[in-house]
Amino acid sequence: MRFSPSSSGRCLLGKEIREKMLDEFYTLFHEIENSLSLINFFLPYIPIPANRRRDAARIKLKEILSETVRSRKRYNQVEEDALQNLIDSKYKDGRSISEDEVTGLMIGLIFAGEHTNSLSSAWTGSYLLNDAKCLMTAIEEQKKIIKKFGRRIDYHVLLEMYTLDRCIKEALRLHPTAPMLLRKVHKHFTVWTKEGHEYEIPAGHTIVSPTVLNHYIPYIYKDPEVYDPERFGPGREEDKVGGKFSYTSFSGGRHACPGEAYGYMQMKVIWSYLLRNYELKLLSPFPKEEWRKFALKPQGKVMVSYKIRQLA
């Protein structure tokens, strides 16, 4: 199961890249993706072949983006896209954002918008196709949406897909795209645990919050190993039991992911379309996590059969 990255690219990249070199761009981009391992998280510059390919690919990506930026400035060309927004950005002191900063931020945005959503969509589909009850509930919701809105899908229609939203959220609880969150402590503070233990956290230290463990805390999530989207439904809302940071698949606080709403919207677009237009079956065993990678992707191939159909 693999989803095309072009949906994020069409939202973020300039038309010059989309129309002329999108395939080349993503071939290079996947070289960067392939280097994302836990080893590289701690030793990012270790001289191994994957890192050499990563570095070469990033240089080439930077050249492609930089040429696009220079071309727009040279010919006074202005487009309505994310790339243009970065080009026009200024700091509080009035200084314009540099070309290097534009290319670096754009590569980061593409990674955040494509890699994470691709993995999360794959996990969502794996769980839905592995659970007949959840799958049927999601399909029934699509039937109700069709009855109410027809086959037109827009932002407001997506907001009413509460069941599909919870299915995605539960898949992300079990398989967050980032297994841990890191924060540097700027001011000394004290923490008291549920058991009454007290810990002093000195300024200058780094805190690691393991998302993969936090989402399995049993006094917050009932039967945490079970895929149960209704745990987020009315009357339960288990993600609020332990406070606003009980659920951190998109991080939290002032550095929470600004693309959370976009991520849910993109995944709902993908799966509402698939549920409406295809009869899907999971052929391979339910996938295990690939722990060698920093982003917890499904291990091996996820094989799915499909038959075209349209929900009435």
Image (cartoon, rainbow, N blue to C red):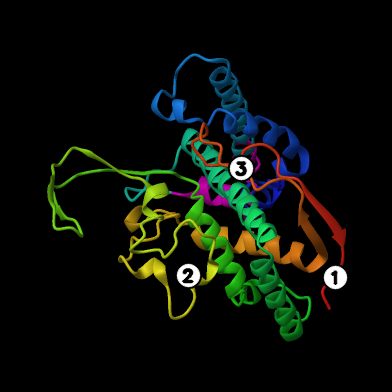
Q: CA distance from mark 3 to mark 1?
A: 28 Å
Question: What residue is at 75 percent from the left and 45 percent from the top?
Answer: 303
Residue 13's place in the image compared with 161, above or below, is above
Location of the C terminus (image quadrant): bottom right
Mark 3 touching mark 1, by CB under 8 A?
Answer: no
Which residue position is annotated with label 3?
298
Dominant secondary structure (helix, strand or loop) of the stretch shown in magenta:
helix
Q: How many marks?
A: 3
Q: Is residue 96 shown left or right of residue 183?
A: right
Which residue position is annotated with label 2?
231
x, y percentage for residue 256?
39, 55
Q: Estimate how packed mark 2 is, as few (under 14), some (14 to 19) or many (20 or more) residues with alpha carbons within 10 Å.
A: some
Mark 2 touching mark 1, by CB under 8 A?
Answer: no
Which residue position is annotated with label 1?
310
Question: What residue is at 72 percent from the left and 72 percent from the top?
Answer: 139
Question: Does any portion of residue 277 appear in the rendered image?
Answer: yes
Tell me the element at label 1: loop
Mark 3 touching mark 2, by CB under 8 A?
Answer: no
Tell me the element at label 2: helix
Which disc is residue 209 wearing?
A: none
Residue 98's place in the image compared with 311, above or below, is above
Q: Is residue 182 shown left or right of residue 56?
A: left
**In which image quadrant can residue 297 be found?**
top right
Inspect the image, locate mark 2, and give the three-letter code of the amino acid beneath it. Answer: Arg
Tell me the element at label 3: loop
Inspect the image, locate mark 3, and give the three-letter code of the amino acid beneath it. Answer: Pro
Q: Is residue 31 shown left or right of residue 40?
A: right
Please state the extent of the stretch shown in magenta in the rendering.
Answer: 70-89
Q: Is residue 163 shown left or right of residue 225?
A: right
